[in-house]
Amino acid sequence: MLLQSQAPALRHLTTAHLAQTMSLLELNSIELGQKIEAELANNPALELIEGRHCPTCHRPLRENRFCPNCTNLHESSTEQPVIFYSYQKDFYNRPAGDDFDNDLPDDNFAARVETLAEYVLRQIAPELPVNDRHIAMHILTSLDEDGLLSIPITEICYYHHVPASRVEQVIHLIQRADPLGVGSPTSQEALLVQLEVLSEYHAPPPFTSEAIRAGIELLSPHHYTDLARTLKITSTQAREIVQFIGDNLNPFPARAHWGEHETTRSNHNEGVYHHPDIVISRMNDEPDTPLMIEIGVPYAGTLRVNPLFREALQQAPAEKTELWQADLEHANLFVKCLQQRNNTISRLIQRLAVIQRNFVLYGDVQLKPLTRAELAEELEVHESTISRAVSSKTVQVPSRRIIPLSMFFDRSLNVRAALKTIIENERKPLSDTQLVRILSKEGYDIARRTVAKYRSMEGILPAHLRGHVR
DNA sequence: CTATGGCACGGATT
DNA sequence: AATCCGTGCCATAG
């Protein structure tokens, strides 16, 4: 019954058809682009008309971006975001300086989305002996979310029947690829690699590498004296070293990419480098600015059933009739499903932008806890519809952060963010129990154990290893 | 004795 | 039905 209310047009469809609707929904714009290419290639009944049309209602877009039917610019408000569409070409060739992240090399479209493993592999490929490729893959697929090697080297040696020295050579190569230090077995080693590369440009304070070797535990402002004693240096020197490391090195290589310069540091990112499927920006600088939602569309034109094909079917040779008939039906369906998908996504993101407006504009602390089920009820679609629409898509918010759409449904992000601000502003390290008390005053009721969990999720050290200078 | 991390259980979510 | 998440209990370190 839910399905009927959401899609009267699809009421007559069979289960197989519905399955197809779903499968389109969970694709992000790149995957969708590939899917459409494939469909176009092997279904003669489908046709792509060049031109700019709204992906949901198929009317021509005004100024090539706005759909006059789906969005009225003049009615936009905090409650009514503006929706517009960007075709792949515009989306990725926009002028520099426009709200866009151009961290990644300007390769082809598909290269924009890749896992950390692919990203690194691509960098080292030229120097990597072909025979060592599988070793590199093994290493890169065994990284934890911090970019550190999570399995012992011996395991790799054993698996590929190669000497340790060879594996180490490959690791050596990987460590010097972009997230500097990635693939190191330990944070310590990652730091050393970063230090080594960095010292080609800037001389670090003396004894820095010795300090790192002495142990991570000694590298907190709390242990200046211990560190100084161990290395037989003055505590001022020790202080400088710790400061330098804190400012320039990163014990968790994979996290480096996620906006250290931003006020809030992005967390668990599934190790994937995304470009956004959707970009949210503000219309103006007023606090009550309407939000603009830009949806990426991977095909430049309108997909439809070729009317000529439909006619040709009348005179089809007998042995082909059945096949062509099937093609035609499939094409018809595909177009409908595509429209349905775009419609769902656009409704979803509009609603989300209103509900989570403060989160979008002002950051993590403002995220309202929201479950997929709640949103499903509001939009009168099935929960799984939301689930699929949300998975594997990314959004760029006005701060230029690119985040997974699923973050809009993170149950604890706001608490974690609050926790972070407390710790950032603490005068001296607070224990987890103390943090629980402060948080409950702010209205977050969570257990002590949970604070500890959030801390480690955010990569914040326990109180006794945490010092605060600044 | 206090602070924290590991393991595991149960309920919520997907 | 599978997975995720918050939490309690216990062991360990300081």
Image (tube, coloured by chain):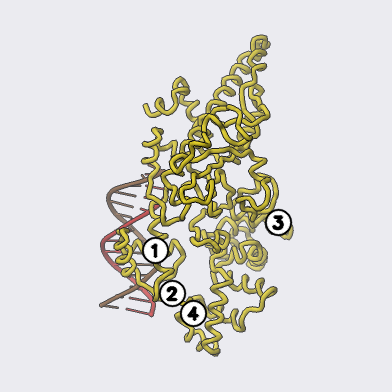
Chain colours: A yellow, B brown, C red
Residue found at x 65% / y 72%: A198
Disc 1 packing (10 Å; few <14; some 14–19; many ≥20) = many
Query: Disc 4: which chain?
Result: A
Disc 2 packing (10 Å; few <14; some 14–19; many ≥20) = some
Looking at the image, is mark 3 or mark 1 earlier in the sequence? 3
Query: Residue A295: x, y in percent?
Result: 56, 40
Label 2–label 4 contact, CB within 8 A: no
Looking at the image, is mark 2 or mark 3 earlier in the sequence? 3
Circle 1 sits on which residue? A419
Label 4–label 3 contact, CB within 8 A: no
Q: Which mark is residue A125?
A: 3
> What separation in Å lies between label 2 and label 4 (alpha carbons)?
11 Å
Q: In which quarter of the image is the N terminus of chain A?
A: top left
Query: Residue A239: x, y in percent?
Result: 52, 82
Circle 2 sits on which residue? A466
Residue in the foreground of this view, choosing between C2 and A115: A115
The correct choice, above or below, for C4 with respect to A11 in the image is: below
Residue found at x 65% / y 15%: A320
Looking at the image, is mark 1 or mark 4 earlier in the sequence? 4
Compared across the picture, whether A454 is left or right of A283 comes to left
